[in-house]
Image (spheres, rainbow, N blue to C red):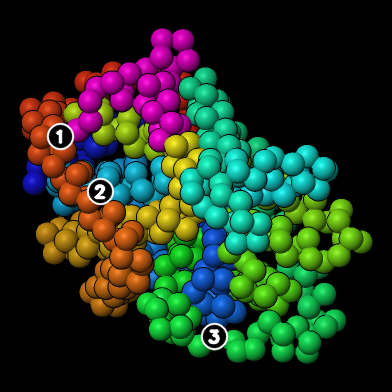
Amino acid sequence: MARKSVAQVQRESETSELKRTLGAWNLMLLGIGCIIGAGIFVRTGNAAALHAGPAVLISFVIAGAVCALAGLCYAELSSSLPVSGSAYTYSYTTLGEFAAWIMGSLLLLEYGLAASVVAVGWSGYVVSLLGDFGLVIPETLTGPFGHVDPKTGVTTLFNLPAFAVCTLLGLLLVVGVSESAKVNNIIVAIKVSVIIAFIAIGGYMVLSNLGELTAKNWTPFIPEPTGDKGEFGWGGILRAASIVFFAYIGFEAVSTAGQEAKNPKRDMPIGIIGSLVVCTVLYMLVAAVLTLIVNYKGLNVPDPVAVAVDSFGPQWAWFAKLIKVGAIIGLTSVVLVLMYGQTRIFYTMARDGLLPRIFATVHPRFKTPWINTILVALMTAFAAGFFDINTLGDMTSVGTLAAFGIVCLTVIWLRTTHPNLPRGFKVPLYPVLPALGIVSCFALIFTVEARVLVFFGWFMLGAIILYFLYGMSHSRLAHGQDQVDAPEMGEFPAPVHEEGR
């Protein structure tokens, strides 16, 4: 239960004083750029094909509402605790070391496995684009181990493109390549442009033949449940909500900008809720176009947007290529930043003594945590190469939902123990909304398949055992040492803000 003091965390922060220059519009645009990512390019098709059908539109509303509850709690924490870092740091400062360890373990699922999910989606778009130019990668090397393609009957052994992109980006991170603000802004603009172009052109094609497409692909809008848990009906809509939840989790970047907001009390909720509302509308429009143009049963693929634009017809081949290139550029950036984020979490935990010091070892030339980065690259590459996207995505969602639930709990704990702590923003309707956030996060967790929950249970049990075997006895805090005494890295600039998923 040992906790870091706010003063200690401030000493450990490597950032300088931040200027309050961001208004509500700045925060909202930041959130939109960070939220739009692999979730909409990759997971929407899985959710529609396997669980909700066209009613995946409702699933987006449910997932967005859950994220809004967690987002308000993030906003309060970022405005009341003058610390830098992720939810791991918040937990260490409030709930204590064990909670911070649990949060660090959950962030491994949120960042590390999320990178694998995005890499699998990246692979799908690359394979599709190369196919447009007559370059065919053997199908056995484009999917998870043991997966049988229902159309061709081919059994895949290994996802080579997904493995390769994780490995190559890991090497880039070892060298110390990071994105500049300008490059990051360009990539965000490309992603948003691809989404809007797809909605505009796809929407035009839908409206020109709305009656026939509605009767063919949207009847019924909510498919009848099959009898199996989470397969269509309202149970399927809730199950799909836990899948498309993956598409929203970039909103945390808005909360991390709390110290830069001109008026946190007013601007933070506008930035968070506004970006979630805009992205929910965009996501629903994308899902509507997807499920109207292509029957939902054919969308269980890693590249659903590519499948949809391919169905536009040969006269739209140029547009299909453009969409795929835009998606590939955006997804490459997402994999890079997610892997980067995971290495920083491991590095911070190693400096705290909770992980072996080798995770904080800095390369003498590149000034990067090279051993840590190589390990993260191999972990994400292995997961992307051998596991299917649905399993990886579900494990990511479970870990993230649990992390968000703890963040909501942290707000309640801090209000109870430190009622007089200055807060730039307070969650409205306290304690109803934080409590509702906890309940809704864990309710969505239990819509996931039992096999994923079993894996999650074993994963957390292993993490807890590791803490008591190693972390607790090696904690620098337990020995009265500050993290600032640990070895520092050299110039390894962080991205301006965390990229969306």
Q: Secondary structure at mark 3?
A: loop
Residue type at numbered disc 1: Gly
Image coords of residue 54 (percent x, y): 59, 79
Residue beneath the point at 32% across and 30% down: 347
User: What label sits on residue 223 in the rendered view?
Assistant: 3
Observer-nearest of 32 and 282: 282
Q: Which residues are magenta?
A: 354-379
In this view, the mark in front (1 or 2): 2
Q: Is 123 part of what is drawn in magenta?
A: no
Q: Nearer the viewer, residue 497 or 284?
A: 284
- Residue 33 percent location from the top left of the image: 59, 54
Q: What is the crowding at mark 3: few (fewer than 14 residues within 10 Å), some, or many (at least 20)?
A: some
Where is residue 399 drawn, in percent x and y? 33, 55
Residue on which the image places disc 2 = 459
Q: Nearer the viewer, residue 193 or 377?
A: 377
Residue for point 75% across, 83% down? 213
Residue drawn 71% across the image and 57% down it: 306
> Marks 1 and 2, Cα distance to the nearest angstrom?
16 Å
Q: Earlier in the sequence, mark 1 or mark 2?
A: 2
SS state under label 1: helix
Q: Residues within 10 Å of mark 1 (few under 14, many from 20)?
A: many
* Amino acid on which the number 2 mark rests in the picture: Phe
Mark 3 and mark 1: Cα distance apart in space: 49 Å
- Residue position for label 1: 471
Q: Of callouts 3 and 1, which one flags the residue occurring earlier in the amino acid sequence? A: 3
Mark 2 crowd level (few <14, some 14–19, many ≥20, 10 Å Cα): some
